[in-house]
């Protein structure tokens, strides 16, 4: 492997982006290029960034969330890593995920395609931020971008990343900025999201400038989501795959930590087949790869299922009605209310029950307050009565899925909403009318849960998520605790959970 460091890549602004390039040993060859750009430091050694993840190969050239250059150069690819403007060694004003950031990546892609060591075909690949920038650059349609591998990214800056259901993702933004951004900033010039984002509680022009127009994503896409990524990532990979305009697109949804699956043997094999197909003109490499591959969860065990679409074509959408502490296929006989927070369980199932796909909660509430925050958790309860947790981003336990909604953000877009995935416009805040029953349609992120005989499904309506560590929505000035709310059950204001039942 040959390495060229701190190359100045010219951009349309006149200020360069600095990059490192890793090339196969063949000095006379030309190679397709895997490119990435991030504010994390193109040369920061992985163990200095995140020693938690020990299963990843920790050789001296490994950098957080980027393709392994030793593995890919050995298979005939060049690997390029660039520093986002204003971070690492790239000069200028930091303006993360802005149109200017996307244009910088466009210029890096086109520069890479013109180099003597390049075949002229470039793909974006990487995890999280690197995947988000892949979607962003694909929207701009650089002529030499041949494909994107978007692994646990996001496409909707507001809904996926920073304001789930209108609730500010304070815990994640603070954690991420302190650990990932502050160490790599090379000046104080540029916005600090910790200060800026709380000033934009609705979906305004600031957020729109950071979002992806998926109608303009036409390159081949390999989108990989993680059922355990209840926050930031899963939604964007599913929506990105579904709405991208590309005629060539594949979706895989796996389990595991935020990092390990990208470097697993099965994932590397899939990425290599996909990239060989579109960067090396080997048309048969994706033969036999289903458009959608899902890890169907049985507790923490999985079985892989190949299919043609998501949600699954055979899905039977069924309503589980909220009763007094229960979830039932039949509505309650009489109308009633219970105080918020509350918990609801199904009866133990008598035969296996698979729920794979999006979940939605139609929740009728009334309250003596102007606004409140709803936190909805779906738990898999074992025969012993204890929750069976999913694998979270760092390997710890998380619920099987979650949803959030600020009551004042309850307005939906009828043209984009589906029964199983309400689409909230987040354009304005509409106060509650005190004491008036009000319908809140809560988007709960997709999941895969298989109940074995004797196990139950539980819906928890909780007051907050501070127990989830950095996934919390707990900004002290932006919280709207539900202190006077009641949940309506049955009658004219029957609350229910819409679940995706997969026939056996």
Image: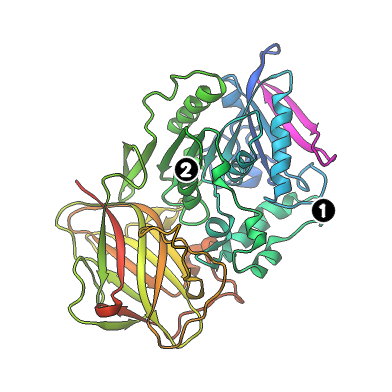
Coloration mode: rainbow
- Are there few (<14), some (14-19), or many (20+) residues within 10 Å of tag 2? many
Q: Which mark is residue 407?
A: none
Q: Image point 79% across, 37% down: which residue? A: 11
Compare residues 415 and 115 and report the one nearer the observer: 415
Which image quadrant for residue 42? top right
Q: Which mark is residue 187?
A: 1
Label 2 and label 1: CA atoms lie apart by 36 Å
Type of secondary structure dominating the magenta stretch = strand
Q: Which residues are magenta?
A: 1-24
In this view, the mark in front (2 or 1): 2
Q: Residue furthest front?
A: 415
Q: Helix, strand, or loop for circle 1?
A: loop
Which image quadrant for residue 320? bottom left
Compare residues 419 and 341 and report the one nearer the observer: 419
Q: Determine if the magenta segment contains residue 9.
A: yes
Compare residues 51 and 453 and report the one nearer the observer: 453
Q: Residue furthest top?
A: 28
Question: Quarter holding the N terminus?
Answer: top right
Residue 31 image offset from top left, x and y in percent? 64, 19
Whether residues under marks 2 and 1 lie with C-beta atoms below 8 angstroms apart, the answer is no
Residue 131 image offset from top left, x and y in percent? 57, 42
Residue 394 visible? The answer is: no
Q: Helix, strand, or loop for circle 2?
A: helix
Q: Which residue is identified by label 2?
A: 241
Q: Residue furthest right?
A: 14
Tell me if residue 189 comes above or below residue 369 in the rendering.
above
């Amino acid at each position: 492997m040959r390495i060229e460091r701190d190359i100045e890549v010219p951009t349309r602004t006149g200020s360069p982006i600095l990059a490192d390039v890793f090339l196969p040993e063949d000095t006379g060859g030309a190679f397709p290029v895997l490119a990435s750009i991030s504010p994390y430091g193109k040369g920061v050694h992985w163990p200095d960034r995140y020693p938690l993840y020990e299963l990843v190969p920790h050789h001296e050239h490994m950098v957080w969330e980027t393709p392994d250059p030793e593995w890919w150069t050995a298979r005939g690819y060049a690997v390029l890593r660039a520093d986002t403007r204003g971070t690492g060694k790239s000069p200028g004003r930091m303006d993360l995920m802005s149109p200017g950031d996307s244009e910088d990546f466009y210029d890096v892609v086109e520069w890479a395609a013109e180099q003597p060591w390049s075949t002229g075909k470039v793909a974006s690949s990487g995890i999280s931020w690197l995947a988000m920038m892949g979607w962003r650059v694909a929207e701009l349609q650089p002529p030499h971008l041949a494909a994107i591998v978007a692994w646990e990214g996001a496409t909707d800056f507001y809904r996926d990343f920073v304001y789930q259901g209108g609730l500010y993702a304070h815990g994640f933004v603070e954690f991420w900025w302190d650990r990932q951004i502050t160490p790599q900033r090379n000046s104080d010039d540029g916005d600090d999201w910790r200060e800026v984002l709380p000033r934009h509680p609705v979906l305004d022009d600031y957020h729109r400038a950071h979002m992806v127009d998926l109608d303009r994503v036409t390159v081949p896409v390999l989108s990989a989501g993680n059922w355990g990524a209840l926050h930031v990532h899963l939604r964007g990979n599913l929506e990105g795959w579904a709405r991208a305009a590309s005629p060539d697109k594949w979706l895989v949804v796996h389990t595991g930590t935020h990092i390990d699956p990208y470097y697993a043997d099965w994932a590397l094999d899939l990425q290599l087949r996909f990239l060989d197909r579109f960067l090396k003109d080997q048309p048969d490499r994706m033969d036999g790869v289903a458009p959608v591959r899902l890890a169907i969860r049985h507790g923490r065990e999985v079985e892989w299922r190949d299919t043609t679409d998501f949600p699954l074509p055979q899905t039977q959408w069924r309503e589980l009605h909220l009763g007094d502490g229960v979830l039932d296929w039949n509505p309650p006989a009489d109308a009633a209310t219970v105080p918020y927070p509350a918990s609801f369980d199904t009866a133990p199932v008598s035969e296996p029950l698979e729920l794979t796909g999006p979940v939605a909660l139609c929740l009728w509430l009334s309250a003596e307050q102007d606004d409140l925050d709803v936190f909805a958790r779906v738990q898999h309860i074992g025969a012993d009565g204890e929750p069976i947790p999913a694998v979270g981003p760092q390997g710890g336990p998380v619920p099987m899925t979650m949803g959030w909604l600020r009551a004042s953000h309850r307005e939906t877009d009828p043209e984009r909403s589906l029964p199983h995935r309400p689409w909230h416009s987040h354009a304005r805040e509409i106060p509650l009318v005190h004491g008036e029953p009000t319908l809140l349609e809560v988007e709960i992120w997709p999941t895969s849960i298989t109940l074995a005989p004797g196990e139950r499904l539980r819906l928890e309506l909780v007051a907050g998520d501070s127990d989830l560590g950095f996934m919390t929505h707990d900004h002290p000035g932006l919280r709207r605790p539900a202190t006077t709310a009641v949940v309506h059950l049955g009658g004219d204001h029957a609350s229910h959970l819409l679940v995706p039942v997969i026939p056996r």
